[in-house]
C-alpha cells in the first residue's frame, strides 16, 4: 500500500507541473535522435573504497630526517623504505610486509609485520623488528633487536648482531594481535646463515646487558612522534626478554605450561616477574596448539587429565633456568596459581626431559 500511494503521489506531482513531462519527452527524443543510449555505469562496492596513494606507504631518498608512520596510518598495508641515509624511522603500526633497500646508517623501528621483513643492500643499521619472517641479503653491520616467529635468515651478509626484542608503545599489543603474531613465539637467536664462510662467523649476539635505547634512541621530542609513549625497558616490553641461545647459567631447567584460559597471557607474565625477581632466567617461550595424541607424547606419564585442557586453545610454555628453579616453580604454582590449570616439572631429575620433549615438539609444529 505504501508503494501504491508513492506512485500516485509522483503522478500528481507531474500533473501539477506539465513542464516536467514535456522536458522528459523532449530529452528522450533528443537522445534517440543523437543515438546516445548510454546508461549510467554501475557502481560496485570496491569503487566506493578510499583510494590508496602509494606514496603514503613508502619512504624514499631521505637524509638526516626523523620520519615514519603513527599508529593507525598503515592498518596492515605493505610498506617500502629505500635509499635513506642517517635517518631515524619509526613505523609504529602493523603492516603486511616491509622491504628495506639501499639504506645506510639508519635507525629503524618496525611495529608487528604479518609477513616478511626483507633488508637488501643495507649497512650500518640499528633496528627493532617484530615479524613473521626476517631475512637479509647483501647487508653489512646490522644490529637487530628481533621478535621473529620463524627462523631468521641471513644471506651474503656480514657483521650481523641480534638481540631479543624489547619495546613498548601503547598500541603495540593490539598490533601484535592484528598481525597474527604471538609474543611468546620468538626465535630471535636461532639464526640460519645461507652463505656461511669456513672459519668465519657472519653473525653473533649483542651483549646481554645491551639496552635498545643505546642503539635506537627514542624519537626527537620535536617530531610528530612526541605524543607516543615509547619505552625499551625490559619490564614493560610486550615481548618477554629471553636468553635464547646464550649459555645457560645452570644445569637445572624447569618446564612450566599454562593451558588456555581467560588470563593465560597475564598469568605467564606474572610467572616471569616472580621467577626473575628470584634470580632465575627465562630461556625460551612458545605458544602452540596440541592434539590429544601430542599430550601423551610430550607429557608421557603426567598426561592424565591434560588432554581435555588442550581443547580450549593453545598452550603457553616457558623454560626457566637456575639452581633450585624446579622447587621454586612448584611453590609458585601451588601458591600464586593454585586455582589455575598448569603443568610444572616434578623434579630436577625429570625436568630436562620435560623441556626437551615439549620444545622439540613445538619446533616441529612450527617447522623450525
Image (tube, rainbow, N blue to C red):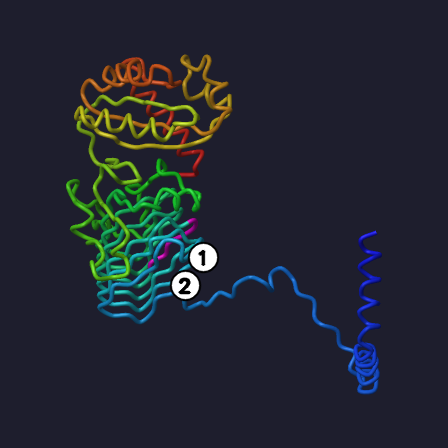
**Relative image position of residue 154 (x, y in whole percent):** 32, 52
Q: Percent position (x, y) of residue 355?
A: 33, 24
Q: Which residue is drawn at 21% across and 46% down?
A: 204
Q: Residues within 10 Å of mark 1 (few under 14, many from 20)?
A: some
144, above or below 88, in the image: above
- Residue carrying label 2: 57
Question: What percent of the width, then of the height, locates residue 360?
Answer: 38, 29
Q: How far apart are marks 1 and 2 (CA)?
A: 8 Å
The label number, if any, that marks residue 68 in the structure image: none
Q: How many labels does the image show?
A: 2
What residue is rendered at 35% in x and 38% in y?
183
Q: Which residue is drawn at 43% across and 27% down?
A: 262
Foreground pick, 95 / 190: 95
The quarter of the displayed image where residue 323 is located: top left
The answer to which quarter of the image holds residue 300 is top left
Does the magenta-highlighted stretch encompass residue 174?
no
Residue furthest bottom in the image:
34
Secondary structure state at the residue bearing disc 1? loop
Assign the magenta stretch its main secondary structure.
Answer: strand
Decide: marks 1, 2 in contact (CB < 8 A)?
A: yes
Residue 251: x %, y % from top left: 21, 23
Q: What stretch is highlighted in magenta?
A: 114-119
Q: Does the stretch in magenta take in 115? A: yes
In the foreground, 225 or 241: 225
Q: Tag 2, which secondary structure? A: helix
Which circle's residue, 1 or 2, is located before the other in the chain?
2
Residue occupied by mark 1: 77
Q: Residue most toward the front?
A: 16
Label 2: how many Cα within 10 Å (few below 14, some 14–19, many 20+): some
Task: Tell me if residue 361 comes above or below residue 108 in the rendering.
Answer: above
**Image-based side of 127 in relation to 258, left or right:** left
Q: Quadrant of residue 225?
A: bottom left
Amino acid at each position: 500500500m505504501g508503494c501504491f500511494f508513492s506512485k500516485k503521489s509522483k503522478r500528481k506531482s507531474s500533473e501539477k507541473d506539465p513542464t516536467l513531462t514535456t522536458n522528459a519527452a523532449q530529452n528522450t527524443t533528443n537522445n534517440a535522435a543523437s543515438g546516445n543510449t548510454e546508461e549510467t555505469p554501475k557502481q560496485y562496492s570496491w569503487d566506493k573504497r578510499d583510494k590508496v596513494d602509494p606514496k603514503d606507504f613508502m619512504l624514499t631518498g631521505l637524509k638526516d630526517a626523523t620520519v615514519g608512520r603513527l599508529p593507525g596510518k598503515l592498518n596492515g598495508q605493505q610498506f617500502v623504505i629505500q635509499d635513506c641515509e642517517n635517518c631515524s624511522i619509526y613505523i609504529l603500526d602493523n603492516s603486511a610486509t616491509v622491504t628495506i633497500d639501499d639504506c645506510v646508517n639508519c635507525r629503524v623501528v618496525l611495529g608487528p609485520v604479518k609477513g616478511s621483513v626483507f633488508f637488501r643492500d643495507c649497512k650500518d643499521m640499528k633496528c627493532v623488528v617484530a615479524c613473521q619472517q626476517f631475512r637479509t641479503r647483501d647487508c653489512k653491520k646490522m644490529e637487530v633487536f628481533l621478535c621473529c616467529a620463524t627462523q631468521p635468515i641471513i644471506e651474503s651478509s656480514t657483521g650481523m648482531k641480534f638481540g631479543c626484542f624489547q619495546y613498548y608503545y601503547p598500541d603495540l599489543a593490539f598490533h601484535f594481535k592484528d598481525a597474527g603474531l604471538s609474543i611468546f613465539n620468538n626465535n630471535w637467536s636461532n639464526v640460519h646463515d645461507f652463505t656461511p664462510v669456513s672459519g668465519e662467523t657472519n653473525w653473533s649476539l649483542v651483549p646481554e646487558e645491551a639496552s635498545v635505547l643505546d642503539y635506537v634512541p627514542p624519537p626527537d621530542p620535536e617530531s610528530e612522534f612526541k605524543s607516543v609513549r615509547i619505552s625499551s625497558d625490559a619490564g614493560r616490553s610486550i615481548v618477554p626478554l629471553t636468553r635464547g641461545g646464550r649459555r645457560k647459567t645452570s644445569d637445572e631447567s624447569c618446564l612450566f605450561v599454562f593451558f588456555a584460559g581467560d588470563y593465560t597471557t597475564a598469568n605467564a607474565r606474572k610467572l616471569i616477574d616472580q621467577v626473575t625477581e628470584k634470580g632465575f632466567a627465562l630461556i625460551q617461550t612458545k605458544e602452540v596448539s596440541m592434539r590429544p595424541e601430542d599430550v601423551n607424547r610430550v607429557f608421557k606419564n603426567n598426561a592424565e587429565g591434560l588432554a581435555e585442557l588442550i581443547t580450549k586453545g593453545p598452550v603457553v610454555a616457558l623454560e626457566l633456568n637456575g639452581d633450585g628453579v624446579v622447587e621454586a616453580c612448584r611453590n609458585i604454582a601451588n601458591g600464586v596459581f593454585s586455582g589455575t590449570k598448569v603443568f610444572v616439572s616434578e623434579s630436577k631429575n625429570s625436568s630436562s626431559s620435560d623441556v626437551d620433549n615439549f620444545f622439540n615438539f613445538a619446533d616441529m609444529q612450527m617447522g623450525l
